[in-house]
Amino acid sequence: PEVVLSVDGLTVAYSDTEVVRNASFTVRAGETVAIVGESGSGKSTMTGAILGLLPRTASVSGTITACGTVVTEATERDMRALRGSQLAYVPQDPMSNLNPVLRVGPQVAEAGGVHRSQTRAEARTRAVVALERAGLAEAESRYRQFPHQLSGGMRQRSLIAMGMINDPTLLIADEPTSALDVTVQRVILDNLADLVARSGTSVLLVTHDLGLAAERADRVIVMRGGEIVEQGPSREVLFAPTAAYTRQLIGAAPVGRTAARVPRPVPEDAPVLLALENVGKVYPPRGHGSRRTAAVSAIAGVSLEVRAGQTLAVVGESGSGKSTAANIA
Ligand code: ATP
Ligand code: MG
């Protein structure tokens, strides 16, 4: 299949420090390639270079060609056009990539509307369909909500909808689900995998998680200290790694290593430092007239207590009310 991304001898430096050094790889049509590596190894710098989104202080050498455009020679305007069409991006942090004062649906519609002649109604319908395909339940009624009214998982789905709305050739996803809890991560990634398989989109997926890379990617690139130390088909890299560092990473992966820590006993008479009794929280409706959104019951009937010396873990899926309970406490 045709090459949709080629990175050839890419070096990125800030002042005198090279944070990506002489990196070369390709992504072909329909392929999912994962970049793994520890924090600071240069993964986001690499994706930033491909997207043309590095700060001006970065000095870049080498050649990047994405979807037929030579990124390393393109103008800012070329790159904006490319990012609005064939090259899409799903960032790690949905909150800082959604405009908090605009409703979610119109932001998705805007992403789909660049350089297109379509009526408002057409743009709206396309956005709702994109949100539904990204797995956002009740997309019609969520359309008018603000980012803070959605859970982390729903916000991430909205960003996936924005990324996929123009049927991109290449989707770059930088830790797209790392801010979410594991059950939601899995569902969202399954959904994304279906979506890209249907559209034939290639994916460059950045992740810390080797297990995830093995499961989702056709090929894996391992980075360390700005260099690619190993790359190849997922199975080979993960089950027969040649680089010592990859073996180290596999050993460090937290798969099945949930330590059986025995909790310290807390005396019965330890004082109760925090008690919630039958606590509920309803977020009031917002807006006016036809734009008014319904009230949201975030938590209801929550009772818990924490005694001196105790650690209480609150777990639950995205949107289940953990943070609301913690904020009230
Ligand atoms: P993480 O897994 O934590 O997201 P990463 O692999 O994405 O890490 P990068 O963000 O690419 O790592 O950072 C690589 C190196 O480049 C780090 O040492 C970082 O401090 C440095 N770096 C990144 N951005 C800048 C910048 N704007 N100015 C100077 N140094 C930077
Ligand atoms: Mg990063």
Image: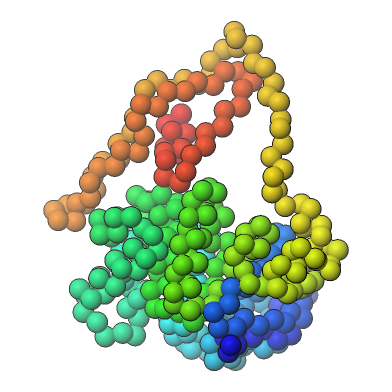
Q: Residue furthest right?
A: 244
Image check: 37 left or right of 147?
A: right
Q: Position of residue 19 (x, y in %)?
A: 74, 71
Quarter-of-image position of residue 10: bottom right
Q: Residue furthest left?
A: 289
Where, quadrant-wise, is the N terminus in this rendering? bottom right
Q: Position of residue 122 (x, y in %)?
A: 23, 76
Number of numbered discs? 0
Q: Position of residue 285 (x, y in %)?
A: 23, 45
Quarter-of-image position of residue 279: top left
Going 71% across and 78% down the picture, which residue do you hit? Answer: 12
> Vertical placement of 1 versus 46: above or below?
below
Going 48% across and 73% down the picture, which residue do you hit? Answer: 197
Figure colour scheme: rainbow
> Vertical placement of 97 versus 146: above or below?
below
Given residues 162 and 75, the one toward you in this image is 162
**Does residue 174 appear in the picture of this structure?**
yes
Image check: 323 left or right of 33?
A: left
Q: Position of residue 173 (x, y in %)?
A: 54, 68
> Vertical placement of 270 versus 327: above or below?
above
Going 40% across and 27% down the picture, which residue do you hit? Answer: 302
Given residues 111 and 216, the one toward you in this image is 216
